[in-house]
Amino acid sequence: MPVVRATVRVLEGVTPVVPIAVPDREEVRAFAERLHARGQPWKGEAFGWSAEYSPQRPEPPLDSKMLFTPADFCIGESGIWFYSLMWEHGQNEPPVEFLDERNLAVDDRQPAG
């Protein structure tokens, strides 16, 4: 798993740079697809990060024009590294992906060790 540096704002004017391990997105996507195929809620740790999967539900989200609540998977910590998949076009359609890595020094990848 590559190790990158991330800036983490902890207090006003205090933003340390810390090393973190970021999993390969293809491996995370494959893990999420396996959870989606099972269709059961799941919450735990994956690749060293908190993660969870919620299956599609027939009732729409509150205050939404959607006809159902889409299945979704998320992993990571917003503001550090966060990745999510949402099957908003339906159970059997490809998911919409969202990646937040704006605080990573992506060009600084090194092998974990």
Image (tube, grey):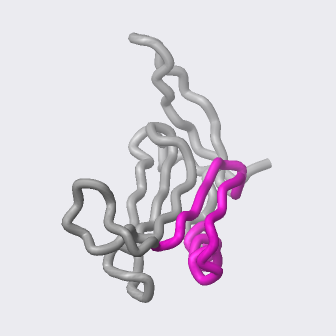
Q: Residue at coordinates 52% horizontally, 57% vertically from top-left? A: 74
The foreground one among 5 and 34 is 34
Residue furthest to the bottom: 92
Residue furthest to the left: 65
Quarter of the image that includes the N terminus: bottom right
> What is the span of residues highlighted in magenta in the rendered image?
27-56
User: How far across and how far down the image is residue 80, in percent?
Assistant: 50, 39
The foreground one among 73 and 5 is 73
Q: Residue at coordinates 50% horizontally, 18% vertically from top-left? A: 10
Q: Is residue 41 magenta?
A: yes
- Residue 85: tell me if it is visible: yes
- Residue 96: tell me if it is visible: no
Residue furthest to the front: 59
Q: Is residue 113 found left or right of 50 in the rendered image?
A: right
In the image, residue 86 sits, relative to residue 100, either above or below, namely below
Q: Is residue 63 found left or right of 26 in the rendered image?
A: left
In the image, residue 8 sits, relative to residue 106, either above or below, namely above
User: How far across and how far down the image is residue 68, in percent?
Assistant: 34, 72
Q: Residue at coordinates 46% horizontally, 70% vertically from top-left? A: 71
Q: How many marks?
A: 0
In the image, residue 97 sits, relative to residue 17, either above or below, namely below
The foreground one among 30 and 35 is 35
User: How far across and how far down the image is residue 113, in percent?
Assistant: 80, 48
Residue 43, quarter of picture: bottom right
Q: Residue at coordinates 48% horizontally, 56% vertically from top-left? A: 83
User: How far across and how far down the image is residue 3, in percent?
Assistant: 65, 47
Q: Is residue 80 magenta?
A: no
